[in-house]
Image (tube, rainbow, N blue to C red):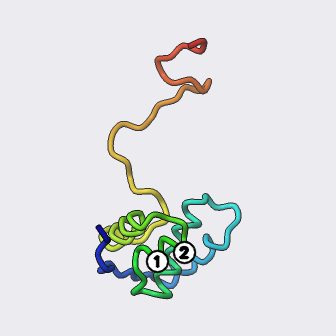
Amino acid sequence: MPLPVTIHQLQLTPEQLAHARKIAASRAAPHREVVRAKLTLLIIEVPAISHAQAAGHCGLHPHSVYQLRRRWAAHGWSLQDAPRSGRPRVFSPTGHHAGQSPGV
C-alpha cells in the first residue's frame, strides 16, 4: 500500500537550517544525524517530493521518511532519535549485562 502524499510540511528557522547544513557536511557527526540532515535539506529544497523519492535520495525506507516528516510536523524538527518507551538498558562497568556473571 503506497504511503499518502505528503501533508507534513517542514518549517525551519534560519538557525536550524544552518545547523542542518553543518551536520549534512560533517564527517564526524553520527551517520543517522547526517542522513536526517540531508533529508531535511532535500525536503526544504523540494517540499512536494514524495516519501519514496526522498527515501531513494537518502538511502532510507519510505516509511522512515514518512515517520520523520510526521514527527517533525507534530513535535518540531530535531536530528536526535525520538524518546524510547520502557526501561533503559543497564550495563555494568565491566561490559557485562547486569545480573550475568563474567564467565557465562
Check the image and report above or below for 4 versus 96. Answer: below
- Determine which residue is flagged by label 2: 57
Residue 61 at x, y percent in the picture: 45, 63
78 with respect to 70 (left or right) = right
How many residues crowd mark 2 within 10 Å: few (<14), some (14–19), many (20+)?
Answer: few
Q: Are marks 2 and 1 in contact (CB under 8 Å)?
A: yes
Residue nearest the observer in this picture, 85 or 42: 42
| Label 1: few (<14), some (14–19) or many (≥20) C-alpha neighbours in 10 Å | some
Q: Which residue occupies the extreme right position in the image?
A: 27
Q: Which residue is mark 1?
A: 53
Secondary structure under the numbered disc 2 in the rendered image: helix
SS at circle 1: helix
Could you tell me which quadrant the N terminus lies in? bottom left
Left or right relative to 89: residue 2: left
Q: Is residue 80 left or right of residue 70?
A: right
Residue 56 coordinates in the image, percent (x, y): 51, 72
Q: Quadrant of the C terminus?
A: top right
- Residue sitting at 37 percent across and 70 percent down? 72
